[in-house]
Image: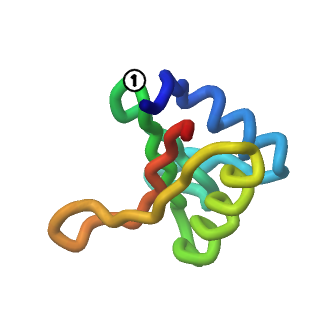
C-alpha cells in the first residue's frame, strides 16, 4: 500500500535537481514544471512550455532516483501529458 505523499515533497526533489517551476506571467505560463496534489497518495507533475515529453522524462528519472514511483500518463480526451507520482 502506498503512503501519504505531499506535493511539497515532490517539489523539493525537482527544485533540488535544478529544475525550475513554471510561473503564470502576463497571461501565459513560463516554461517549467507544475505540481498538483491528487488525493492523499498521489501527486501529478506537468510541464508547461515546449519540450513537454523530454521534460517529463527528465522529471521521471529524477523522481525515480529519489525513490518515488513516477508513471507517465495522459489526461482523458487527448488531454495533457503528466506524471503520476506515488511512494512505492
- Residue found farthest to the front: 1
Residue plotted at (55% across, 37% down)? 87
**Displayed quadrant of residue 41:** top left
Residue plotted at (59% across, 52% down)? 33
Q: The residue tagged with tag 1: helix, strand or loop?
A: loop
> Which one is nearer the viewer's eye here, 4 or 21?
4
Judge whether 23 appears above or below 56 on screen.
above
> Which one is nearer the viewer's eye here, 53 or 50?
53
Q: Is residue 41 left or right of residue 21?
A: left
Residue 53 pos. (x, y %): 54, 76
Q: Is residue 42 left or right of residue 68?
A: left
> Which one is nearer the viewer's eye here, 65 or 30?
65
Q: Is residue 36 left or right of residue 88?
A: left
**Displayed quadrant of residue 12:** top right
Q: Is residue 51 left or right of residue 44?
A: right
Residue 63 pos. (x, y %): 68, 50
Residue plotted at (43% across, 59% down)? 82
- Label 1: few (<14), some or many (≥20) within 10 Å? few
User: Which quadrant: the C terminus?
Assistant: top right
Colour setting: rainbow
Residue plotted at (65% across, 46% down)? 21
> Which one is nearer the viewer's eye here, 88 or 72?
88
User: Which quadrant: the N terminus?
Assistant: top left
Residue 74 pos. (x, y %): 33, 66
Q: How many marks?
A: 1
**Displayed quadrant of residue 59:** bottom right
Residue beneath disc 1? 40
Amino acid at each position: 500500500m502506498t503512503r501519504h505523499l505531499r506535493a511539497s515533497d515532490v517539489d523539493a526533489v525537482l527544485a533540488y535537481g535544478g529544475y525550475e517551476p513554471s510561473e503564470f506571467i502576463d497571461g501565459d505560463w513560463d516554461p517549467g514544471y507544475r505540481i498538483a496534489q491528487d488525493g492523499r497518495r498521489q501527486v501529478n507533475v506537468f510541464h508547461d512550455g515546449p519540450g513537454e515529453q523530454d521534460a517529463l522524462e527528465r522529471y521521471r528519472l529524477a523522481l525515480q532516483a529519489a525513490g518515488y514511483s513516477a508513471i507517465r500518463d495522459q489526461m482523458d480526451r487527448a488531454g495533457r501529458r503528466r506524471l503520476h507520482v506515488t511512494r512505492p
